[in-house]
Amino acid sequence: MMKKIFFWLFLIPLCFYNMHLFAVEKSAFNEASNDSILNTVSVSKLLESRDYLFVENGKNYFHVLLRNGFLTGPFQNNEFVYKDYSSQVPEEINVEFQALIPTKMGSDTYLLYPGGGMLFKFNESVGAIKRIDRSFAHRNQYSGYFFSHNKNLYLLGGYGFWETKSLLTKFNFSSGQWDYIPTTGQAPEGIDRGAFLIKDDKLYAAGFVSRNSNNQKENREDNLYVLSLPTSTSIGETVASDAFNWEKKGVLNPLLLNAPITALNKDWIYKDNLLVNIVDDPNLYLIDPIENIIKTIPNDLLLYKSGGKSIMKNSEIISTVRNSATGSVSMAYFDINGIENNPNISEEYLYRSSDNFYDFLIFGAILLVSIIIFLWVFFSYSNKNYVLIDNEIIHAKGNLKLSEIETRLIALFINKKSLANSKIMSLFTEKSKTKDYAVKRKNRTLTNLNKRFSELYGTSLLYNQKSKTDSRQTNYLLNEKINLKRN
Amino acid sequence: MEIELLVYYFLFLFLGAGLSAFLNGYLNNTFNLNKMYDPVVDRSSHKDKATRSGGLALFLTFCICYGIGKALGVMSVDLYALIAFCFVALIGVGDDLFTIKYREKFFVQVFAGVVLLQSRVYINNFHGIFGIYEIPYWASAVITIYVFVVIVNSLNLIDGIDGLAALLCVKFFVIVGAILAVSSKEMELVVPSIIGALIGFLIYNMNPHKKVFLGDTGSLLLGSVMAFYIFYILDDRSSIVTDSNISRPLLAVLLLIYPLADTLRAFIIRAYKKQSPFIADRVHLHHRLIDKKGLNHWQSTLTILFVSISILVLGFLLSSVLSLSLVILCLLIYMIGIFFLIFK
């Protein structure tokens, strides 16, 4: 008895304390009777429960799935039509709707239970969510990429049981099970989160992480990967064994690498390309993997204010914004129409591949060969140079010490290729000595110098020749292969 | 290749070469005026006057090129790595101008290695060598510092003949440049600056009339920059485009094959002769080419350059078709063959 009294004493104040919450939800749902038209304020009240999910519809409309019914809109004045589900939501959906992963195939929307396994179908015309699998919540592929392609549903990668996976599974509509699809090529180690784009039967994957199974350390994958998808459209048709082939395209532009690991979590398909918003980054990035282009678009859309899952409809990002002061939630539309025409857009490569590596390698090899050829030519030329410094001839093959008279003799040939005998004789002539002595001394000096020069450098320094104008006169010529310089 | 990148490449290549040529000439004259020549001793390969001003010119060239690159917003290297390079260069300058004891040099190198660790670029993974992959931080730190000291000193030891260390560095940076061009936008332009600086230096290094040597400043500085890029390749957080072709540790060893192989060989010979492994002598392979084969410096340098390129290319090609252990075996056989064919 006492327990019951305490229970009621506790419960009644609690109900009063939370009265405003009950009031909001009750009033909202009172307004939201079947087929009622709700205005923006009423929709916002419904969204305060946080248990909602945006899913796509036809060209101009989208749905907001709620626990008991769904909204379709926006119609005139941003009004939505509310409908109750024709049957109760399966009890297996025991998580918030935000946790479900939606994908569109044809006119139907499929909802995947977090971690994979259980699959639900939202049928708009019937107005119901039904479970369609015979699997179970295996919790093996959290944060995997759930997508549809050519009338098939796939789940790629994910994290579960302390491991990231890169496995691909396909939903078998006949058995209600998920079939394992073997892939070939350079598959990444694991795919957890990330940004994805399907274009021309290829799935482009980037910005995901893998985790070390021992210490759970996250490793950001810096490369862009491409998974080829089968082009076949008929259900049940067997596909080639290498239809699902992975290819590692190359290293992503550092614009994306510098982002925090979990940042590539807001992305939308915009005009067949991937539009990415990175946390703490004021820019939007428009990625075209086929053209290998990433466009950096400065924007003032204040996308960071939006929370939860969003969808792209025509050229509007539809999300919710929570007022931090009042806590109220309202639907927000971020119009990105024409952002690609922004004059301040900068364009860069998206990834560099091994082709670029080989290009640079060839460029480097040409550079190296050019350096060698340049040095070779430079030193072939400089090998001709014999530099007179003090009493020494300096050359790559060695230095030749000179006597004082030899230095004076060599100095005469600097910038001159030929000298008359009389000029050389002037070096050796002494007033106190005979001319014969001077001639002998000159000849001895020249012979000695030539001999030592030849021994060291393998070529003679000087040779004599009769003058063409006067046969009695001898000229001394410097070897043509020698270029004498003074430092 | 994008045109803008190519323009920057050539800009920094010519800037590096021009600055280096000017600074080498200027410092050579200054050193000559002050009669600061490299002493000619028995084991010297040069007989003429030369200055050890090349390293200082390279260091100043790097600083100016990096400053311009940073100002243009096209170049960025981790600050801790830059501090480590400065430490190593300064101890080199000290050793070139005065004489510093080996123990003191070694201490500064270890300290620079510790500073380099703070850049968060280090060997944190063995990539399957000995069946080991990720390694704990303390082991990473010890191994990184050890490898840093080994690389820095091995480059210092092969700097014995004209052009050898510089041309082997050019080869290293050409390949690292191609890797960085794919994986690191902020560091890709460091490479043309270094190659340009080395071209400017080589013009003087091989010039008999104004001979300039790298000195300890140059060899230690280049060694530490090379060590940093080796760590970048071995760090499992960096994405290396050659991963699908060749194992990272094998690539790192092949990039430095001549300095490592020659240093190891010299240490073994000295240990066999019961000498200190750090004693300076003429047992290096490049000395053999000059002393026994009668080649000149230029011929020896080119021979060693082409041999080291051939080993790298062979390793790269074999890695695409054979397992790592078989590749290593083939390369060892090839290297032994080359030794008997060219160096014996």
Image: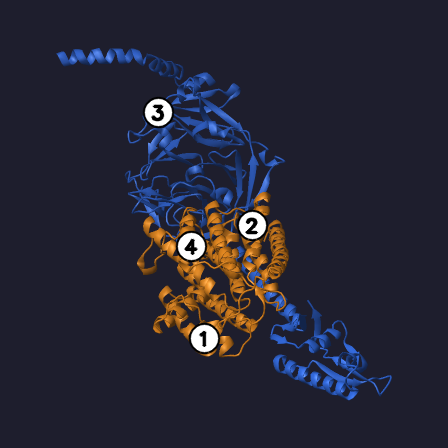
Chain colours: A blue, B orange
Q: Earlier in the sequence, mark 1 or mark 2?
A: 2
The quarter of the rendered structure image containing the C terminus of chain B is: bottom left
| Image location of residue B258, percent across then percent down | 46, 67
Q: Looking at numbered disc 3 in the image, what kind of residue is underneath it?
A: Arg
Q: Viewer-nearest of labels 4 and 2?
A: 4
How much space separates mark 4 and mark 1, taking CA atoms?
33 Å
- The residue carrying pointer 4 sits among few (fewer than 14), some (14 to 19) or many (20 or more) residues within 10 Å by Cα, namely many
The answer to whether tags 1 and 2 share a subunit is: yes
Q: Chain of mark 3?
A: A
Identified at 44% across, 54% down, the residue is B233
Q: Viewer-nearest of labels 3 and 4?
A: 4
How much space separates mark 4 and mark 2, taking CA atoms?
20 Å
Q: Earlier in the sequence, mark 4 or mark 1?
A: 4
What label sits on residue B109 in the rendered view?
4
Q: Nearer the viewer, residue B206 or B126?
A: B206
What label sits on residue A67 in the rendered view?
3
What label sits on residue B338 in the rendered view?
1
The answer to whether tags 4 and 1 share a subunit is: yes
* Residue that extends furthest to the front in the rendered view of this protein: A432
Q: Nearer the viewer, residue A355 or B199?
A: B199
Q: Earlier in the sequence, mark 4 or mark 2?
A: 2
Q: Chain of mark 4?
A: B
What label sits on residue A296 in the rendered view?
none
| Image location of residue B163, percent across then percent down | 55, 66
- A384 to the left or right of A356: right
Q: On screen, A418 above or below A143?
A: below
What label sits on residue B63 in the rendered view?
2
